[in-house]
Structure formats: C-alpha cells, structure tokens
Amino acid sequence: MTLSHSKKNRSDASPLHLLVVDDDAGQRSLLKSFLEGQGHTVTTADSGRAALDRIQDTPDIAMMISDVRMPEMDGLETLRRARELRKDLPVLMVTAYADIRDAVHAMRDGAVNYLEKPIDLDELLDAVGRATGATVSRDRSLTIEDLRLPPEIIAKSPATYQVFREIALVAPSESRILITGESGAGKEVIADMVHTWSPRKEGPLVKVNCAAIPENLLESELFGHRKGSFTGASEHRIGRFEEANGGTIFLDEIGEMPPSLQAKLLRVTQDGVFQRVGSNTPVHSDARILAATNQNLDKLVQTGHFREDLFYRLNVIEIYMPPLRERRADILPMATRFAAEFSPGNPRFSAALTACLELYDWPGNVRELRNAMERATLMARGELILPEHLPPRIRAKAIDTYADETGTNSVKRMDEIERVVILQTLREKDFNRTETARALGISRRALIYKLQRFADQGHAIESEETKKGPSGA
C-alpha cells in the first residue's frame, strides 16, 4: 500500500461536501481526517440508514463514499436507495473482500468505481476528482524538516522519509494501523511516532509483545483477571487494554496471537468491549490499536491461522518499514549515533569500517546495527573504530560482497580496501600525512602506523610518499 502526504491547494481546487459511510469508526476517522485535509467538507454516517438520512437532509452532498460490508443495510442496498433519492449522486464503493468485486462490477451503472481496503489515499483522491470533476491538486513540498523528527530518529533515505510522511498523514486520525516489515527494521519506532503525533499523545502508550508472553498468560495480560479465576491469580489485576484507555495500545508480533484470543481481540476492535478472565462483566476501553508483524498475514489468513475478519479490522491502514538494506543512506548516520551512544569519547570510523558498514546487508536490520556498534566501541577501546572491531560475521560477509561486486574470484581482505582508500587520499593530498590524516578522520600517528603495516605486508608505498621520509610532512 502506498500513502502519500497530499495537501489540497485550496486556491485552485473546488472544495466538495462528501459523505463517508462506514460502520468502522477507525475507517470513518481516517477518511474524514484525510479529505478534510484536502479542503473538503465531510459528513459521516455509521450505517446505511443514517447515510440515507444525511442525503435527504443535506442536498449539497456531492459524493458518497460507502463501505460494502455493513450490518442491517449493506453498502449495495445503501447504494440502490441512495440512487433512488439522488439519481445524479456519484457513489464510490469501498471493500475489504475480494469476493465482492464481481458484485461491484455488476452494479457499475450505479457506482462510479470501487476501491479495495486498505485504501490507497492518493487513489481515493483521484477517484473523487474523476467522479465529481473537481480539480485534484497536491502539494508535495513537505520536507523532512517540516516533520520535526526527534533527534534520535534517522531519516536520510527517501524510503524512510516516505514512511514518516505517511505517519504524519494518518497519526491525527483514530484509525487502526498495521505496521509491517522485517524483524528489527524499526516497527516500534513507527508506533512511537504515531502516538506522539496523534491527539492521544498525552495518554498512555502501552506495548505488548504477543510472542514473548506464554499463551496461557496472554489473555490475562491483555484483558486482566479476577482474583481466584485461575491458579496463581491471587489478586485482582487490570489488563493492558484498561491501562491504555484514552491512549494507544501497540500489539507487536500480532501474527503470533493464538486463535483462541483472536475472537476476543476482534470484539475489542469492533466496540472496545472485553471481559476480564473469570468475569462476565463487560469492560470498555477507548484505546487506539496499533499492531505490528514481520509475518505475511495474508498467507496466515489463507492457511486459517489468522482470522480474516480480524485482519481487515486491524488493517485499516498499512505502513511498511523497509529493511535497512533498502535504505542504505540511513546506515552510516545510524552507526554514528549508536557509536556516540556507547562511547564516552568522540568515536571516529576508519575508511575501511565505513566500507564494511555500507557493503553489509544487515539481515538483522537496525537491531543488528546497534548491537554491532556496541561491540565495536567496546573492542576499540579508543576513538578510532576499525573493521576488526565489528563482529566477525559482518566483516566476513562484507568481504564476500566486495568480492562479488568487483567481479573477483579471490576473497578480498578489508584492509586492502583501507589501503586503497588511504593511498588514494595520500595522492590527493600530495602525500602530506597531516592533511591525509585529517581527511580520513584519524590521527597522524594512526596513519603512520597503518602505512608501516602496509609496508610490512609487502605493499610498496609510492615513491613520492617514500621521499617524504619516515617523519615527512
């Protein structure tokens, strides 16, 4: 799914009065927030009958955007009756169920189009423009500075920048968000920023790792329990949903939730109501739900391991965090920040270390990078960090990658990369060691040591450098 931060240019686009119909409060909130952000007036309805009342009472409604699956009166019946009231009313249908497409296609004479959930908001904006003839204008001038990211957040690559633009767009709404991406990619950071940029920021942000809690305890952890409801329940305990009331609850590794609890979670997503373990009394929680997974929930739905209705309830909006290898511009800034965090001094990277960090694919993503830099700062015991201070597997893999990219059959040592960079810099600085060391970000003493090591390994130093003598400039 692609979301874009799109802002209506009100000076050259006509505002419309739009009717959004959906029994899901999160979906209504998302569409209302987004469309109003484009300069439109938005009226909402939580049922088909309420939508018909709005159409009768509000003659200037220019378009209806309606969900298909709704209780009592579904979207198809709402469409038919709305067209009886207003034959010229454009209607856009929204569905989360692939099997409804044939039905939507069959009534194209009534609906102008249909969109599939989770909705691509740019596609929605285009559909509204085509159906109403309104000018669609986008202002994509939002910069990374405009987002005002906290200093600990690194977003140098275009892919990461786009993620935070998406967060800025959907955070103000009440919609549920499914955060996807590989383990360690930074999904929890997305949850943090959604909460921070939302109207609920003054409320609690409660985090639950569904994979880290035993199945027999997870229900109590989420919903609480009454004293004596099971062995070991020595006192009354409220659950994490109650703790998150008025704020946000983040359910990490949602794909690991056992099927027995998925039905109970479904009810919470529908009406915010649950029961504590050992109690029949309903409890209400006004908590915005964010969920994250590194698994393919579509496949889990197909295999019957994850409820389809729960999947669509959670997946009002999907935000995908790309792996670190797909946003390489973030690697060095992140590594620098982590090194500064773990080192009491002023850590500096050798040229070979920089090459190593950039060549490695980081299958463990940000978590692996952070751990690697913690080890490197400890092993360095000084300000200069070298490749040998990294975990051996990272250095070895970077060597293999270097060999593959250069088309060589023999394994290249990382000190050869360093030697090439140093000698190239020496030539650029006319073999002035002081200037070379400054350009490389190392001390002059460290540079002399490295040159001596290269000579000991049998690598000839350029004659111009040799003429400078052992204590040259």
Image (cartoon, rainbow, N blue to C red):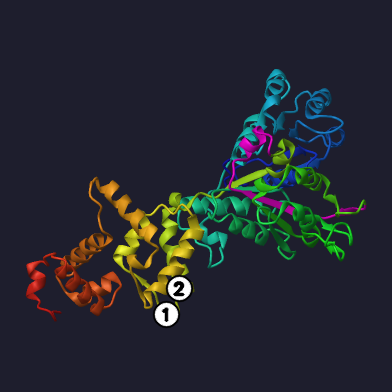
Secondary structure of the residue carrying tag 2 is helix
Is residue 82 part of the magenta span, yes or no?
Answer: no
When asked about the image quadrant of residue 25, the answer is top right
Q: Which residues are magenta?
A: 281-305
Secondary structure of the residue carrying tag 1 is loop
Find disc 2 in the rendering and name its residue: 340
The x and y percentages for residue 216 are 76, 53
The residue sitting at the bottom extreme is 471
**Up-down: is 102 above or below 55?**
above
The x and y percentages for residue 61 are 77, 36
For mark 2, does the 10 Å Cα neighbourhood hold few (<14), some (14 to 19), or many (20 or more) residues?
some
Q: Is residue 42 visible?
A: yes
* In the foreground, 37 or 377: 377
Question: Which quarter of the rendered picture does the C terminus lie within?
Answer: bottom left
* In the foreground, 12 or 56: 56
Is residue 300 part of the magenta span, yes or no?
Answer: yes
Q: Is residue 40 visible?
A: no
**Up-down: is 117 above or below 199?**
above
The x and y percentages for residue 356 are 34, 59
- Checking the image for residue 345, the label placed there is 1
Rendered residue at 75%/30% (across/down)? 68
Rendered residue at 45%/79% (across/down)? 344
Q: Is residue 146 left or right of residue 248?
A: left
The three-letter code of the residue at mark 2 reads: Ala
**Up-down: is 348 above or below 255?**
below
